[in-house]
Amino acid sequence: RPRVLSGIQPTSDSFHLGNFLGALAQWVPAQDENDAFYFIPDLHAITVPHEPKLLRKRVLVSAAQLLAIGIDPEKSVLFVQSQVPEHAELAWVLSCITGFGEASRMTQFKDKAAKQGTDHAGVGLFTYPILMAADILLYRASHVPVGEDQRQHLELTRDLAQRFNSRFGKTFVVPEPMIVKETAKIYDLQDPTAKMSKSAATDAGLINLLDDPKVSAKKIRSAVTDNEREIRFDRETKPGVSNLLTIQSALSGRSIDDLVAGYEGKGYGDLKADTAEVLTEFVTPIRARVDEYLSDEAELLRILEHGADRAREVASRTLAQVYDRVGFLPRK
Ligand code: AQP
C-alpha cells in the first residue's frame, strides 16, 4: 500500500480552519487506502520561543483533536515526534548534505525570522525544513498531505532524498506533496488575501475549531467582503466572498457552483449566516469528543506510546541503513 505521512504542530490551543481544510481533512480518508503515519512535531514546536507547561498541554490537546476528527490509532500510526529519537538523528545527517544557500532560500524561515528579528531567530528555525525532510524520509512516505505553504519544504525534501540516493545508494523514496487545489490555502477572514494563520497580528480573522461556535459565528458575520452584492466565486476580485464559499463548500460537501446557484437573489448576510451554521454543526461534535479524550489522560498517553513503538519499528530500520550507507560503525 502507498504510504502517507503528515504532521501538525502543537503550537496553539486549537487547530484552525486553515489547518483542518488545508491538511487534516485529507488525513482521515487517506488512512483507509494507505499506510498512514500521522504525528505531532513537538521538536518543530520549540523552534520559536515556548512555554514548557503549555507545550505539554498542547501536545495532548493536539492528540485529542486528531482522534476527535477521526484519526483511528489502530488504522494509522499516531505518535509524537520527540518519542521517536530517529527524527533528530536523521536530521543531522541530512543537514550535512544541505547547502547553506539552499536552506537560506526557504521563504517560511525568512518570514518567521523577520518577525523575530534575524539576530534573535534560533538556528532551529533555520534547520526546521531539514528536520521536516527527516520526518518524511524516515518512513519512506510516498505522499504527504499538506497545505500550499508547505510546497517549498516538500521540494527541499525531494532534493535531499535524490541527493542522498545518488551519493550513497538508493535509500529514500522521493515523496510527492498531496495538495487539494480548492482548499490548499484558506484565507484570513479580515484580510482575505493573507493565509489564515495563528500568528496573524489579530485573531479576528482566525477560526479555531475548539472556540465557542458563537464566537466563530460572530467572526464570520464580520468577515471582510466587497462593495458588490453578487455572490460568485472569483478569487481575484472577490477574495472574501470566495473564501467563505470555499469554507462552506468544504465543510458541507456541496460544490461551489451549487452554493452559488442557491444564492441567486440573496445577499452576503445569507452567505455568512449559512457558513456560520455549517461551521457550528461541524465543530460541535468535535469539541465534545475532544473533551472526552482529554478527560482520560492516561489513555491518551497510552495511545501515543503505542504509536511511537510502531513508528520506531520503521524509523529505526531506515536510520540503521542510512548510518551504514554513510559509513558509521554498526550500533547495538
Ligand atoms: N491557511 C491555511 N490554509 C491551508 N492550509 C494551511 N495550513 C496552515 N495554514 C493553512 C496547513 O496546516 C498544516 C499544519 O501546519 P503547521 O503545523 O505548520 O501549522 P502552522 O504552520 O503552525 O499553522 P499556521 O497557522 O500556518 O502557523 P504559522 O502562521 O505560525 O506558520 C500544514 O499542512 C499547513 O500547510
Image (spheres, rainbow, N blue to C red):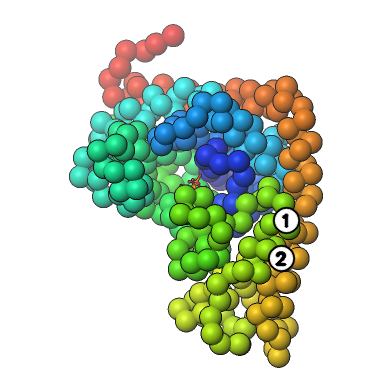
User: Image quadrant for the N terminus?
Assistant: top right
User: Image quadrant for the C terminus?
Assistant: top left
- Callout 1 secondary element: helix
Any mark on residue 276, and which? 2
On the rendered structure, is 68 left or right of 62?
A: right
Residue found at x 69% / y 23%: 302
Any mark on residue 213, and which? 1
Q: For the residue carrying disc 2, how many other residues have a C-alpha within 10 Å: few (<14), some (14-19), or many (20+)?
A: many
On the rendered structure, is 64 left or right of 332?
A: right
On the rendered structure, is 106 left or right of 219?
A: left
Residue type at the position of mark 1: Pro
Residue found at x 52% / y 62%: 188
How many numbered dots are placed on residues in this image?
Answer: 2
- Callout 2 secondary element: helix
- Above or below, 328 against 77 in this view is above
At which x and y percent is residue 183?
56, 63
Any mark on residue 237, and which? none
- Above or below, 248 against 208 in this view is below
Q: For the residue carrying disc 1, how many other residues have a C-alpha within 10 Å: few (<14), some (14-19), or many (20+)?
A: many
At which x and y percent is residue 228?
56, 87
Disc 1 and disc 2: Cα gap in Å? 8 Å
Mark yes or no: residue 186 visible.
Answer: no
Q: Are marks 1 and 2 in contact (CB under 8 Å)?
A: yes
